[in-house]
Image: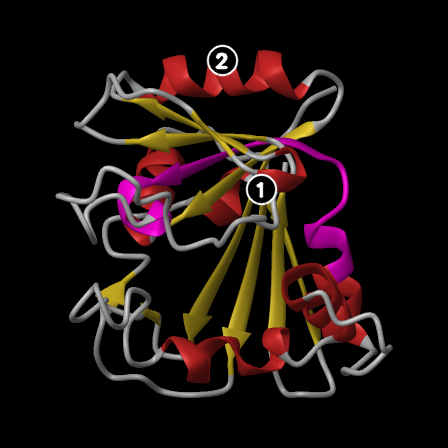
Amino acid sequence: MTRVRMDLFVSLDGYTPSPEDPPGNPMGEDWGRLTEAYVATRTFREKVFGDTSGAGTTGVDDAFASAFFEGVGAEIMGAAMFGLHSFPDDPDWKGWWGDTPPFGTPVYVLTHQAPKEPIAMDGGTTFHFRAGAIEDVLAEATAAAGDLDVRIGGGYRTAQAFLRAGLVDDLHLQVAPIFLGRGNRLWDDLVGLDRTHTVTSQVAESGVIHVIARR
């Protein structure tokens, strides 16, 4: 049965980065600090950088990184995560993810710029652009995923929208052992998840706290 999954990065004080100067730094100044342990894993290096040397960390962080890439049949993300507004006047702009994005599935981009022609990329990823209600987009993504799961990719506004609507079955938070003190507060006006989901946690060798909320 298809489940709706979400993986998010957050600091100990509850912040996600606020992107600044999108053309040059689309994920925000603090993104590297927040995702350092994840980027260092062997799985991330292989899946995203194409590094098949076996380099990278193993252990708890790598186990969660491996699970991130398994069993996903479709993805939903916001326009900012795709990079749709970074170069609005460039008709050949295909997002921040390179010629071979690390998804390999249909990806549904939520944007007010839809309708917009889909963009087929190497490796099996096709970006589709949708302006409808998130419930309608989720229904389309679920149909495309078949027996696999749908992953909500972010950014934080998209994540909050799906969490507020009660549409997320499995939430994985990677809580980095840092205090940002700035950015976007992920959990503002989001209450009661612990009442609808079973929450567990595991601390990795890196100090990252992996929090899992599952219903």
Q: What residue sits 47% from the left and 53% below the top?
A: 97
In the rendering, which numbered label is found on residue 140? Answer: 2
Identify residue type, mark 2.
Glu
For the residue carrying disc 2, how many other residues have a C-alpha within 10 Å: few (<14), some (14-19), or many (20+)? few
Q: Which residue matches tag 1?
A: 197
Which quadrant does the N terminus fall into? top right
Q: Secondary structure at mark 2?
A: helix
Q: Give the farthest residue toward the right.
A: 54
Q: Is residue 147 magenta?
A: no
Question: What is the three-letter code of the residue carrying label 1?
Answer: His
Closer to the camera in the image, 180 or 86: 86
- Is residue 128 toward the left or the right of residue 22 in the image? right
Residue ID at (43%, 69%): 10
Where in the figure is residue 149, as x and y percent of width and height? 67, 30
Count the numbered circles shown: 2
Give above or below for 112 relative to 187. Answer: above
Q: Position of residue 39 (x, y in %)?
A: 60, 75
Q: Which image quarter: residue 52?
A: bottom right
Counting residues from the start of the chain, the first of labels 2 and 1 encountered is 2
> Judging from the image, what secondary structure is the residue with disc 1 in?
loop
Residue stretch in magenta:
66-82
* Pick the front one: 114 or 59: 114
Q: Position of residue 116 (x, y in %)?
A: 27, 21
